[in-house]
Image (tube, grey):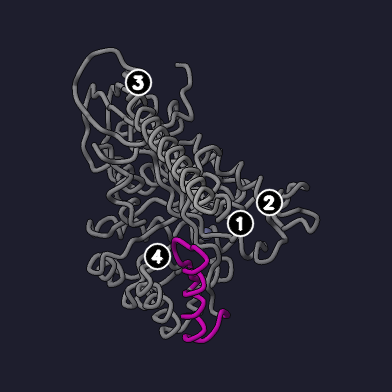
Amino acid sequence: MKQLFQNLRQRRLLQWLTVFLTVASTSFLSATTASAQAEPIAIRAGRLLDGVGGVMENVTITIEGSRIIRLDDSSGPVDYDLTDLTVMPGWIDTHVHLTAHFNAQGRYNRDPDETPAQTVLYAAENAHRMLMAGFTTVQSLGSVADKDLRDAIERGELPGPRVLTSLRAISVSSGTPDELRSIVRELHADGADVVKMFASASIREGGVKLMSDQQIRAVCHEANELGLRTVVHAYGTESLTAIIEAGCEGIEHGNRYSDEVIALMAEHGTYLDPHLGLLYANYFDNREKYIGLGNYTEEGFALMEEARVIGYETFRRTLANGNVKIVYGTDAVAGAHGMNAEEFIYRVRDGGQDPMAAIVSATSLAAESLGLADQIGSVRPGYLADLVAVTGNPLEDISSVRNVKFVMKDGVVYKNLPR
Ligand SMILES: [Zn+2]
């Protein structure tokens, strides 16, 4: 009897094993079939700016799944005929604030009655606006709420750009060098993609250096140990010199620094993310929504007007060096999401940057600064299929960046307007 029972158990086990193996092999087969059945998508670009400075005419881009697999001059039927458009790699904004929004009363301050769910929904709206404006990757500097939104977009259903986030920010009051090192370790453990640090005061408070060289070094060294980049809010020669010499990866804002700092940035390969136009225009256009809150005082606004003028002068001197890695960021806060491409126009029209250099700064160079140089920012086989297409030729008229007609991210079309 016992023997029979054991045999029965063995037979049952064998049956289950057979069922399991059959199911497993069937799912494996169907998964293989599904991916083999996923039809490649063909797109014809009238003009293609490849993100690394190249221009091609009448190119067919073939995409399989989320990746570009081929570029050629074949003239067969395509899924998306963009022969009347200029196609580029999806744009990258290296400095936004995803959760920043005006409250239900149209003001910038936090509404005490706002729920965390409402905050995240505002952020999702901002993300959607930026994707529709052609930005397929953004770095948010940042809020803890960015993380859930980043992960939700990554799941592939919620439309938005790929998100990298700092979660929180480190400032002079965050602690001693030892305490700062432990904060960096916490950020790493919590899933931050980058460390954001405020080495200088807000420009509305004069932008003076606040952090000690020891604090700056502690943060950037600890982050480097963990494989994290550090980007630093900073103004002026003293702050920038300390940041560059500490080996921090990027400078946010910049503004009002010496020619020696420019040479130092070029020598160390430090990324500079200047904010020339959109940031100030957005504050000035939405003055009534900001004024009276914190450092958004009359004096603060006057200091921003001064910084805007000095910013262009600093930018032109930096451009003249020719070797500084200037990446594309807007510091998009409430009111600016979806307007991110305006910065191209300020850069080229008012800052004197070459249009191709401005586009490269928002594509392959921005990708390099995020550590994603082998994934995004270029239109070439093997890269993720992130594309934006505009009417006209931005190399001849930079304002054509406002006319986004087509957006693809990870091989999925999110925008394809009739023309
Ligand atoms: Zn910012």
Residue 251 circle label: 4
Sequence-first disc among 3 and 4: 3
- What residue is disc 3 on? 82
- Circle 3 residues within 10 Å: few <14, some 14–19, many ≥20: many
Sequence-first disc among 3 and 2: 3
Quadrant position of residue 24 = top left
Sequence-first disc among 4 and 1: 1
Of tags 1 and 3, the one toward the viewer is 1
Residue type, numbered disc 3:
Leu
Residue type, numbered disc 4:
Ile
Q: Are marks 2 and 1 in contact (CB under 8 Å)?
A: yes
Q: Is residue 176 covered in magenta?
A: yes
Q: Are marks 1 and 3 in contact (CB under 8 Å)?
A: no
Is residue 395 positioned above or below 296 on the image?
above
Marks 3 and 2, how far apart at CA:
37 Å
Q: Is residue 255 covered in magenta?
A: no
- What residue is disc 2 on? 119
Q: Is residue 121 left or right of residue 395?
A: right
Residue type, numbered disc 2:
Thr
Residue type, numbered disc 1:
Ala
Quadrant position of residue 388 = top left
Q: Residue furthest front?
A: 1
Marks 2 and 1, how far apart at CA:
8 Å
- What residue is disc 1 on? 145
Q: Are marks 4 and 1 in contact (CB under 8 Å)?
A: no
Of tags 4 and 1, the one toward the viewer is 1
Q: Secondary structure at mark 4?
A: strand
Q: Secondary structure at mark 2?
A: helix
Q: Is residue 146 left or right of residue 117?
A: left
